[in-house]
Image: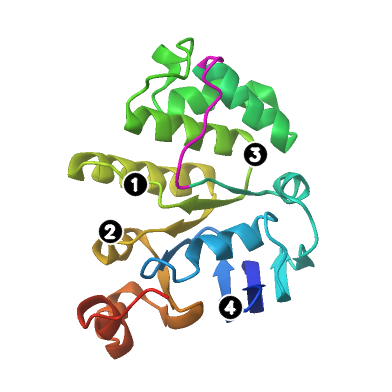
Amino acid sequence: MSVLEVSDLAKRFGSLEALRGVSFAVEEGEVFGIAGPNGAGKSVLFACIAGFYRPSSGSIRLDGEEIVGLGPHQICHRGLVRTFQTPALFHSLSIRENVLIGARFGGAKEDRVEDILRFLDLERVAERRAVNLDLFTTKRVVLAAALATGCRVLLLDEPMAGFSFGEVERYLDLVAEIRRTCGVTILIIEHLLDVLIGVSDRMMILHHGQVLFSGPPDEVRRHQGVVDVYLGGGTGG
């Protein structure tokens, strides 16, 4: 069953077409990877889905219901939440309080917060102020706040940017465990194809705001258009 359906989506900023005719569907419980060069439209796509941008045209359906025109708060209450490339926490608050804000934003039960802190190995540092944290801990707090909303669909925008190789592996383990334990459907943007191929059930490659490839991860390296973009000097647009 498709939990998220995007049909013929376009987003224009004046004369610039950031997205053009983007269509895809995400099945319940899967990890759907999205890649593409800088400027391909990946983050704009997430912004449209999560209600931060209104598409110029096209349809976005969550559980079969149109969500174009709804704001981020309304979409969050329907079970879809997005994280950002640059993590932003309330530095004057504790880690636990930051996660509680996520629960309140999503209208979820606050008693789940302790389970989420424990699940992401944040329980021991939960009373620390969310300032001067290392990057991996910061990203886990962001992830905890997103899960605390009670989301069923989670959009992760380059969550591993800045990680070491070991931290990438640990984060991918977390993604797999979230899918397995929480039953959350995950869309993840990542530049590195090898990383996405290892974690995704299906993948989509964007280029110049259009879908260049959509299909199983094991086919992406054999797609000539993808090879040209990643190895042949294609530009991001």
The residue lying furthest to the top in this view is 127
First in sequence, mark 2 or 1: give its number: 1
Q: How is the image coloured?
A: rainbow
* Nearer to us: label 4 or label 3: 4
The magenta stretch spans residue 72: no
Number of marks in picture: 4
Quarter containing the N terminus: bottom right
What is the number of the mark on residue 150? 3
Residue assigned mark 1: 160
Residue assigned mark 4: 17
Q: Residue at x 24, y 64 (%)?
A: 194
- Amino acid at the residue labelled 2: Val
* Nearer to us: label 3 or label 1: 1
Provide the secondary structure element on which disc 4 rests: strand
Contact between marks 2 and 4 (CB within 8 A): the answer is: no
Provide the secondary structure element on which disc 1 rests: loop
Q: Is residue 119 left or right of residue 93?
A: left
Horizontal and vertical percent position of residue 77: 75, 44
Horizontal and vertical percent position of residue 3: 64, 64
The residue stretch that appears in magenta: 85-94
68 to 153, vertically: above or below: below
Contact between marks 2 and 3 (CB within 8 A): the answer is: no
- Amino acid at the residue labelled 4: Glu
* Nearer to us: label 2 or label 3: 2
Contact between marks 2 and 1 (CB within 8 A): the answer is: yes
